[in-house]
Amino acid sequence: MNTISKGTFCSVCNGRIETILDCGMQPVSNRFVKNNSSETEATFPLALGVCEACGLVQLNKRFQQHELIPKYDWINYTEPEEHVEMLANLIAGLKGKTILGISPKEDSTLEKLRAKGFTTYRLTEADLNCSLGSEIIQKNLSERADDIIKKHGTFSVVIARQILEHAYAPNEFIAALKKLTDNNGTIVIEVPESTKQLDSLDYGMLWEEHVSYFTETTFKNTLKKNGLEVNQFLVYPYRTEPSAIAFVSKSKNINIFKKMQVPMHASCEIKRAQRYGQLFNQQRTKIRE
């Protein structure tokens, strides 16, 4: 893997991306081509970069979205669940009684909320006109938000767990979440928090099929850039990949965020990402010894 020069533009702030790690041509991690098979394993360019403006770590050479959809129905993705009881209790303390889940990743949370007497709804394949995998749901949600509102109305709480990091167009995905939420409602967004993996030089994280690798700082800056106020923020400390959870509402003063030129602490995040890229060869040699 070689470090290459500056390339594309940030999917959140449109800043220039510095490529920190070029992985060359790589297969999709869920393909599982059989040994001695005549099937040719498809490979695609993959590179990781960091935005020079906001510090968000993201893929700047990406597979096409449809290529990430698993070919096998026996592949199931699971997310950490130890914190779901706590999450449901926090949501139960919010104003409003109608709660929307975006994908099956919210099912366990919605089940606990129904047991507490809340009215919940989870979007279906019919609502989104697609399968409910993270690889495609965020694109279709952006396109079909208006139709969903016509059918189901808006909700006092909208939950999106572990989807934003897969979004090829995160601003459009967040805009759809805002549309689906009452004006005084709350959006609950959960993403993997990548500080630990970046600092520990965990290069395996690149094969998790994420587009964005959020830290607490870049997650909060992304939300602010999209006109959201962070009312509550917590990080649940899982051993490998902590979960960052933001309770946000629509900002009453959008102009503040439109004028935001230099996000807080972006320079620290850029240095963290550059170190991650610079130490790859050293870490690879150390592991192979």
Image (cartoon, grey):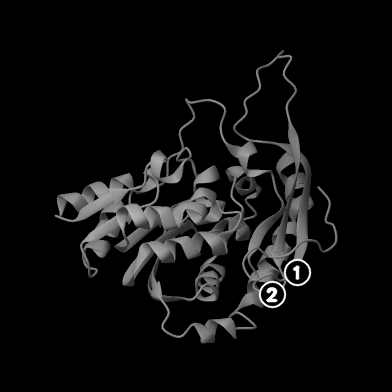
Q: Secondary structure at mark 2?
A: loop
Camera-side residue of 147 and 160: 147
Q: CA distance from mark 2 to mark 1?
A: 7 Å
Horizontal and vertical percent position of residue 85: 26, 53
Camera-side residue of 224 and 145: 145
Q: Secondary structure at mark 1?
A: loop
Q: Is residue 39 left or right of residue 66?
A: right
Say which residue appears at 49% left-offset and 82% top-offset.
254
Camera-side residue of 127 and 261: 127
- Few, some or many residues within 10 Å of mark 2 (<14, 14–19, 20+): some
Horizontal and vertical percent position of residue 270: 69, 70
- Few, some or many residues within 10 Å of mark 1 (<14, 14–19, 20+): some
Say which residue appears at 72% left-offset and 59% top-offset.
49
Give amino acid for label 1: Arg
| Residue 260 visible in rendering | yes
Residue 38 vs 236, above or below: the answer is above
Q: Which mark is residue 53?
A: 2
Horizontal and vertical percent position of residue 282: 77, 52
Q: Which mark is residue 16?
A: 1
Q: Is residue 206 left or right of residue 120?
A: right
Say which residue appears at 33% left-offset and 52% top-offset.
151
| Residue 83 visible in rendering | no
Dot placed on the residue nearer the N-terminal end, 2 or 1? 1
Q: How many marks?
A: 2
Asked if the residue at tag 1 contacts the one at tag 2, i.e. Cβ–Cβ closer than 8 Å, the answer is yes
Horizontal and vertical percent position of residue 229: 43, 77
Give amino acid for label 2: Ala
Residue 253 vs 169, above or below: the answer is below
Residue 151 vs 258, above or below: the answer is above
